[in-house]
Amino acid sequence: MKDKNLRALILAAGKGTRMKSDLAKVLHPLRGRPLLTYVAGAARAAGCEKLTVIVGHQADAVRSAVAGEDLEFVEQKGLLGTGHAVMQAREAFEGFTGTVLILCGDVPLLSVETIGALLHRHRESEADVTVMTVVLEAPGSYGRVIKDEDGEVLRIVEAKDASDEEKRVCEINTGIYCAESPPLFEAVVQIGNHNAQGEYYLTDIIEISRRQGRRVVSFIVSDPMEVMGINTPDELDRAARYLEDRQDGQD
């Protein structure tokens, strides 16, 4: 059943250079279907009334590959980071005052049940922003989630910009969020690019929202595989095996 107060924003503009292919990352086939279709299907099944997809690299090819999926497309010209991508969708969400579910087009294993649990956490805690996180033993190059003593999220620090103490944090950002609109876009327009990459990080909405007196919480997902981004052919193979195992478990 569709929820008129819930819309999805799917980030699908990336090149995917580590896939060793000219194909846009979100079009790589997983068990015969483009990655993007898994994400769109999960968002639709979770009740999103409308799905907006941010395209960039091979934008026309992405549109063609998912034609008939009832998606709205917004093009990101110049791939300047996830914050910049969301900024491009401001007009598409003008007048919308519900919850925006921000998903990644290269994270195809996220279940409808986990999206539902994220939404429940977001609404039950009356948060303005909820970030989906996962705890990893070896968090490596992922952005660290920094919290206060009450467990509320203070900021997310990219690994390249993290101090040695911050790098010891094992709770990491998955890139998946729930955020209230229009406060989301009020925060996004304030994002700067003063960081090691010179990009506009969507993660900066955490600190900006906190400064505005808004409530930011996290939702920790239990299965790291569900939030695995597909960046390499090996990860694509792992995702296929995971889906096979999940299907076998349901039979």
Image (tube, helix red, strand yellow):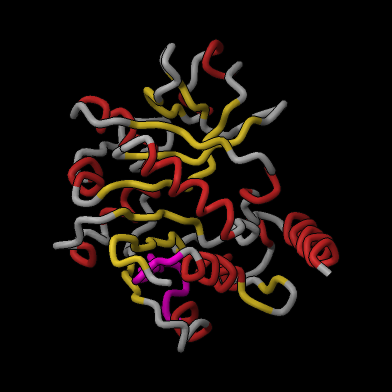
- Asked where in the image residue 98 lies, by quadrant, the reply is bottom left
Q: Position of residue 107 (x, y in %)?
A: 59, 57
Name the residue rendered at 64%, 54% in the picture: 231
As drawn, 251 above or below 194: below
Magenta stretch: includes residue 90: no
Q: Residue furthest left?
A: 95
Which quadrant: the N terminus? bottom left
Q: Position of residue 62 (x, y in %)?
A: 48, 77
Of residues 77 and 128, the one drawn nearer to the viewer in this rendering: 128
Of residues 3 and 200, the one drawn nearer to the viewer in this rendering: 3
What range is drawn magenta here? 47-60
Magenta stretch: includes residue 57: yes
- Asked where in the image residue 151 lies, by quadrant, the reply is top left
Number of numbered tags placed on the structure image: 0
Q: Position of residue 3 (x, y in %)?
A: 35, 66
As drawn, 194 above or below 112: above
In the image, taking residue 165 as reference, residue 81 lies left or right, namely left
Q: Residue furthest bottom?
A: 68
In the image, taking residue 205 as reference, residue 171 lies left or right, namely right
Name the residue rendered at 52%, 27% in the picture: 144
In the image, taking residue 130 as reference, residue 251 lies left or right, namely right
In the image, taking residue 132 as reference, residue 52 lies left or right, namely left
- Asked where in the image residue 196 lies, by quadrant, the reply is top left
Name the residue rendered at 62%, 52% in the picture: 229
